[in-house]
Amino acid sequence: MYSDRIKELLSKMTLEDKLGQMTLLVPDFFDKENNVDLTGPFANLEFSEEEINSVGSILNSFSAEKNINIQKNYLEKSKHKIPLLIMADIIHGKSTIFPINLALGCSFNTEAMKTMAKTAALESSVSGIHLTYAPMVDLVRDPRWGRVAESTGEDPYLNSIMAVAAVEGYQGKDIKEYGNIASCCKHFASYGAPEGGRDYNTVDMSEGVLRDFYLPAYKACVDADVKMMMTAFNIFDRIPSGANTFLYNDILRKEWGFKGSVISDYAALDETMVHGFAKDAKEAAKAYLEAGCDIEMMSPHYLKSMKDIAANDEKYLKLIDESVLKVLHLKEELGLFDNPYKDANIEIEKNTLKSKENLQKALEVARQCIVLLQNNNNVLPLNPNMKVGLCGPFATSEDVIGTWAFEKGAISLSDSLKNSNIDITVAMNNELGSMQEKIFDVDIDYSEVSKLKDCDVILACVGENQEDTGEGASRANIRLSANQEAMIKNLKQLNKPVIVLLFSARPLELNPIINDVDAILQVWHLGTESGNAIKQVLFNEYNPSGRLSMSFPQTVGQIPVYYNHYNTGRPRTIEMRYVSRYLDCPNEPLYPFGYGLSYSNFEYSNLNVAVVGETIKASVKVKNTSEHKGIETVQCYIRDIKASVVRPVLELKAIEQVSIEANSEITVEFEITKEMLKFHNAKMEYVFESGEFDICVGKNSSEYLKETVSL
Ligand code: BGC
């Protein structure tokens, strides 16, 4: 698998050189003549020049000029002239920012995800970035966890196809080619299930649940030839995930045959000591190396502690060689030995970042991510001659680009409406502070309501500050802030249609406002083109097509609430005391997975299901009974009625997105193979078990037609 060039290189390297390749440092070491003002785990460490000049990779350096300089300075000093690998968190766009990933999941369109990844890869590569820490494919069920923003949601099938689209978009056919970058899937494994939705918290689940729900998207990345895997901060089965040999050696490498590199998450080796798993840095380094972690991110234990451990220990020397070969191989695959700057180019960068073409792509993707949740009396779409009242903290805000974006400034809704000559009146638009800064609400002068009295329709632009989403941004309360809810109630006195635009990065609890408003559009944090995308949906320049990739709870007390749960022995099929229920709340979510309205109206009929040979074939008629052409996402679910282990009440198996003309009907077909019906039995074998299956085809996970077949 490895070329002679890198084998020969390895043979010339000292142990110190090798440990350098297995270490990632901040870029400051290389572009400031080593005068770095360090905090955190590096603060008290003295690195020798030699150590620094042997380091293999850096993170989050974003411009061509900087990256060319860093690489040049580094290569001048480095002994073996092995180029630096420049990695970055390009999560939903580099300079042209696309919607957050949860919203991308709601497009239910893998092409949208691929467009994002391709555009991000091009912008990154011309800026000298070689690898992105994306996609994040952690399955999520708890909207209190801030990082749901980075995931495509609660479904293993949707997450898997989106993950593949992202990897293919970033990497293209060959990562060496112009405009492509390597992709790092994260966070292996099960980071998306922290107890109580609190970031970094304990994860505890059965192996069957791990394998059937949480692992498929990581596996899909491996099958799509993802080049790197990142460890997770959580423990799995009481062992820190990056040191977990069951996850890394048994599953990732042996079972799945992953040949790429593994990188620790940020300073995660330190955390093994805090968890009480490793006594000291040496034990931490040993544990990570034994589990097959090739690169240590932002902590220095390989570099500082491994020398003594490995010096006379063949076992560790061998593991180190294997890791270094993987790192060098990745650099070779990227073509860095022949051209260490790859596509970095200051001139081309100027014309590429935020180019007209890229912004147009971001707009086309962003509008597909908006989900119409409610539209009483068809108050939407709006007519461009209407007088539009805009209020709430996000009416004029440009801070709706989303978490993990290193560029600021989206086009605000008000600017976009102004550019289209819509008659707008703005009131009560103070921006919402951040809970990170201990600001829990926004000041609203409710007397300003009267400013909106002559408007035909009111857009209440509410949500959450983007700082309060993403990593380290868990919330115990997922309602809108009290003043935002009060503002919405205040609008009722105007007796005008009120449309809520929800700028959030997680499902929020909407029951407190739902009866006070006519329509709700979930607009997420949509990135650079936010205002333009929302405008297009409001005025029917784009008929909304987004579908929820995560269930919206009725109340925080229901969490976790997700569609593909197991049945209880006492489901709530009748109302009586001893059934599985809440006394004060339905079991179902407010809006289920797969849900989303359109300006069209789609009706389903004639579900035909038949077994043909080894497969199940299903067809359904979908009629657009409205005057609007629209996009429908036809969803095919199954239920495995009886098996050797309990199976979910419903599982998404396929989707078909179709555009249907006004007043016309089409037939949509699905094929379900035995492979698609496999699951892990009690012995963790991946098997198909014959029996009866419900085939459910419809609009979402709670509205569908159903037929039962035997296979
Ligand atoms: C996050 C990763 C990210 C890394 C590097 C960590 O805190 O968990 O997702 O890629 O930082 O920025």
Image (tube, helix red, strand yellow):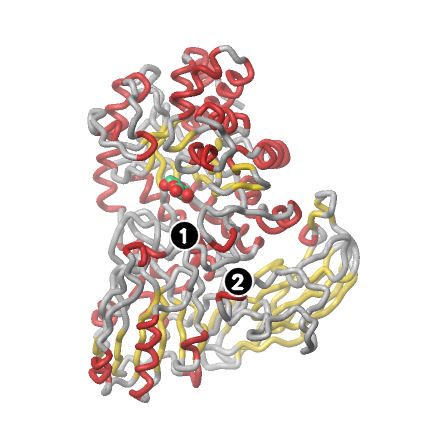
**Residue type highlighted by circle 2:** Ile
Structural crowding at the residue carrying mark 1, measured as other residues with C-alpha within 10 Å and reported as few (<14), some (14–19) or many (≥20)? many
SS of the residue at dot 2?
loop
Give the residue displayed 30% in from the left and 56% down from the top.
Answer: 359
Label of residue 274 in the image: none
Q: Quadrant of residue 178?
A: top left
Give residue 622's position: percent from left, percent from top: 58, 74
Q: Quadrant of residue 121?
A: top left
Left or right: 345 in relation to 204: left
Look at the picture and state if 592 lies above or below 123: below
Q: CA distance from mark 1 to mark 2?
A: 33 Å
Residue placed most toward the observer, 434 or 339:
434
Left or right: 252 in relation to 309: right
Give residue 448's position: percent from left, percent from top: 21, 80
Q: Quadrant of residue 264?
A: top left
In what quadrant of the picture does the C terminus appear? bottom right
Label of residue 559 in the image: 2
Q: Nearer the observer, disc 1 or disc 2? A: 2
SS of the residue at dot 1?
helix
Q: Which residue is mark 1?
A: 115
In what quadrant of the picture does the N terminus appear? top right
**Residue type highlighted by circle 1:** Thr
Left or right: 23 in relation to 48: right
Look at the picture and state if 313 lies above or below 607: above
Give residue 400's position: percent from left, percent from top: 30, 60
Structural crowding at the residue carrying mark 2, measured as other residues with C-alpha within 10 Å and reported as few (<14), some (14–19) or many (≥20)? some
Mark sitting earlier along the chain (1/2): 1
Look at the picture and state if 491 lies above or below 428: below
Left or right: 447 in relation to 379: left
In what quadrant does ligand 1 lie?
top left
